[in-house]
Image (cartoon, helix red, strand yellow):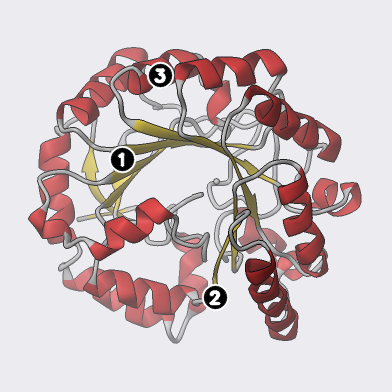
């Protein structure tokens, strides 16, 4: 997963920064759509904000007709940026057809994957189809930490997938989620990303929601660890300037959401069943693609950020951070 909008926080990507800087109400469509195409995953990660895993696909995920109808609307409205995530997006039965559909219409598409099963053949196909980038989650610079975080995962398989992408000439991004047991490896992780051919590295604070609610006692870094973590990142950002972009988001979740409340990003989060959220760090739903057009949902999105319930929820986070544990109890606006 952000890659995901806020996770507290994958840092803003260049696309997200542009979206945040553009006043959404002046646009006829979002600049960026982040689509969790399925909740099915081959891994069961301790920190997964979507609680994805084997057998975790939603029972009402969009069918093939709905999938391509949505993509057609995205193309008609000339949304310039789109990402496929999950779960594990490559497990969607129509994954490569969806990639081809988007890329042949000249939209810029990013894939967010765990890299497992990314064979040389699949990597070469993604290159031929013309994806903008593939972001691989690599939550550890060693087999010990990576395998501890990514249950059912394997460090060597992830590294092999990244190498296959690099060999095929696919632009690579690396995403890193810190925990108490891998936070000390951040310098090594940045170095490893560069060695593997990544052009960007993303990280930020890990979010208290999804699977992390149940495993927080095994995950959460102490503030002293975060202080060292961000110090190293500042150093690595300078070290790799001009060679690899090192993005990190120090802002806490509450600060980020208060900022978004004043300046909503021109970004939609689409769930596997077609529900559309304001942002993945809030429970609020502003539309349903099974019943509404993308245009209708975009209009709802613009007004939903002004709903008093949204501001109230964000302020209540200031006194009760556990409210983020209820993000999958959707609230319709």
| Number of the front mark, 2 or 1 | 2
Q: Confirm whether residue 329 shows in the render.
A: no
> Nearer the N terminus, badge 1 or badge 3?
3
For the point 69% across and 78% down, the residue is 226
In screen coordinates, is 144 left or right of 239?
A: right
Q: Residues within 10 Å of mark 3 (few under 14, many from 20)?
A: some
Q: Confirm whether residue 239 shows in the render.
A: yes
Q: Residues within 10 Å of mark 2 (few under 14, many from 20)?
A: some
**Which of the two residues, 211 or 239, is positioned nearer the viewer here?**
239
Secondary element at tag 3: helix
Most distant residue in the right direction: 144
Secondary element at tag 2: loop
Residue 220 picture location, percent across and down:
70, 71
In screen coordinates, is 255 left or right of 88?
A: left
Q: Is residue 12 placed above or below 74 in the rendered structure?
A: below
| Number of the front mark, 1 or 3 | 3
Judging by the rendered image, the residue that carries numbered circle 1 is 275
Judging by the rendered image, the residue that carries numbered circle 3 is 98
Judging by the rendered image, the residue that carries numbered circle 2 is 250
Residue 329 picture location, percent across and down:
40, 54
> Nearer the N terminus, badge 2 or badge 1?
2
Q: Is residue 90 placed above or below 35 in the rendered structure?
A: above
Q: Which mark is residue 319?
A: none
Q: Quadrant of residue 196?
A: top right
* C-alpha separation, residue under disc 2 versus residue under disc 1: 29 Å
For the point 47% across and 73% down, the residue is 253
Q: Is residue 68 placed above or below 280 in the rendered structure?
A: above
Residue 51 picture location, percent across and down:
58, 46
């Amino acid at each position: 997963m952000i890659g995901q909008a806020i996770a507290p926080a994958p840092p803003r990507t260049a696309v997200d920064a542009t979206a945040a800087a553009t006043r959404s109400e002046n646009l006829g469509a979002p600049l960026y759509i982040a689509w969790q195409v399925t909740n099915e995953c081959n891994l069961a990660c301790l920190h997964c904000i979507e609680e994805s895993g084997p057998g975790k696909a939603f029972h009402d995920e969009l069918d093939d007709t709905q999938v391509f109808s949505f993509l057609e609307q995205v193309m008609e409205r000339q949304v310039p940026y789109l990402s496929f995530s999950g779960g594990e997006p490559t497990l969607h039965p129509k994954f490569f057809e969806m990639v081809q559909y988007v890329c042949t219409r000249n939209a810029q598409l990013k894939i967010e994957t765990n890299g497992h099963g990314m064979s040389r053949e699949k990597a070469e196909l993604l290159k031929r189809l013309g994806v903008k980038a593939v972001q691989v989650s690599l939550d550890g610079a060693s087999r010990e930490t990576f395998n501890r975080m990514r249950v059912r995962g394997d460090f060597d398989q992830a590294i092999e997938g990244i190498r296959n992408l690099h060999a095929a000439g696919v632009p690579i991004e690396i995403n890193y989620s810190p925990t108490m047991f891998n936070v000390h490896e951040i310098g090594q992780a940045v170095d490893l990303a560069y060695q593997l051919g990544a052009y960007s590295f993303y990280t930020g604070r890990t979010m208290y929601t999804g699977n992390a609610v149940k495993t927080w006692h095994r995950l959460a870094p102490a503030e002293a660890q975060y202080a060292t973590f961000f110090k190293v990142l500042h150093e690595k950002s300078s070290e790799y300037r001009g060679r690899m972009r090192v993005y990190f988001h120090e802002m806490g979740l509450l600060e980020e959401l208060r900022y978004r409340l004043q300046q909503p990003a021109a970004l939609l989060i689409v769930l596997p069943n077609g529900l559309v959220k304001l942002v993945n760090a809030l429970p609020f739903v502003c539309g349903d693609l099974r019943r509404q057009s993308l245009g209708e949902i975009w209009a709802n999105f613009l007004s939903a950020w002004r709903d008093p319930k949204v501001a109230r929820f964000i302020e209540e986070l200031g006194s009760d951070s556990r409210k983020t544990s209820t993000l999958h109890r959707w609230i319709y606006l």
